[in-house]
Image (cartoon, rainbow, N blue to C red):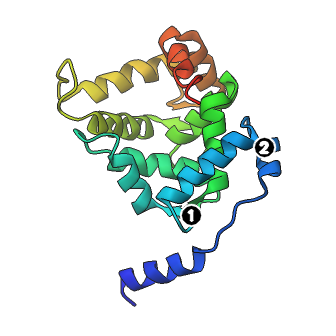
Amino acid sequence: MSRDKIEDELEMTTVCHRPEGLEQLEAQTNFTKRELQVLYRGFKNECPSGVVNEETFKQIYAQFFPHGDASMYAHYLFNAFDTAQNGSVKFEDFVMALSILLRGTVHEKLRWTFNLYDINKDGYINKEEMMDIVKAIYDMMGKYTYPVLKEDAPRQHVEVFFQKMDKNKDGVVTLDEFIESCQEDDNIMRSLQLFENVM
């Protein structure tokens, strides 16, 4: 069967996804019922089937970064949103993540970010995983960032961060090391607060 035909059939089977009751989502998130209704309308507008696959997610995400290549970062982000690891993001997945990123505690935000960096989901971040994410961020920002970045900037960035985070120097960063290091860094703590007043 051709890949397109399989994707078409997959899309047909997921067309009728209806989210859990808004009351249940309101209890599980930091959003009001009204906010959830607004988010759902926007989600359904972009994804009429009620489910987003990775390709659609990448297309939507790319619109925000016209000068760079956001596809790799969008891939990692999609995997972090896809908590069931089934290749699709439902409204519930989207709202749960958004709730953490916009309204979660510092600890919840850091745990979510750790999960994003832990690409292979083994409970640790190694230097390669960190390098993959940082490189994806640099690619997404594009060649037009100011100041213009040197070719080896991502590697230098990772070396500095990894040295700071790998407290016991065992070559991997645990969740506890990650949280402790981030909480010690004023720039990271400020960046976590950037989105608090978005909605």
**Residue 136 location (% of width, % of height):** 34, 40
**Residue 158 location (% of width, % of height):** 37, 26
Q: Which numbered circle lies on residue 26?
A: 2
Q: How many numbered tags mark residues here?
A: 2
Between 102 and 42, the residue placed more toward the observer is: 42
Q: Is residue 94 visible?
A: no
Q: Secondary structure at mark 2?
A: helix
**Residue 164 location (% of width, % of height):** 48, 16
Instruction: Give the residue at mark 1.
Output: 51
Residue under the image location 71 percent in, 41 percent down:
34
Distance, label 1 to label 2, CA atoms, is 19 Å
Q: Is residue 82 above or below residue 118?
A: below
Q: Is residue 167 above or below residue 122?
A: above
Q: At label 1, which amino acid type do we have?
A: Val
Q: Secondary structure at mark 1?
A: strand
Residue under the image location 74 percent in, 38 percent down:
32
Residue under the image location 56 percent in, 34 percent down:
113
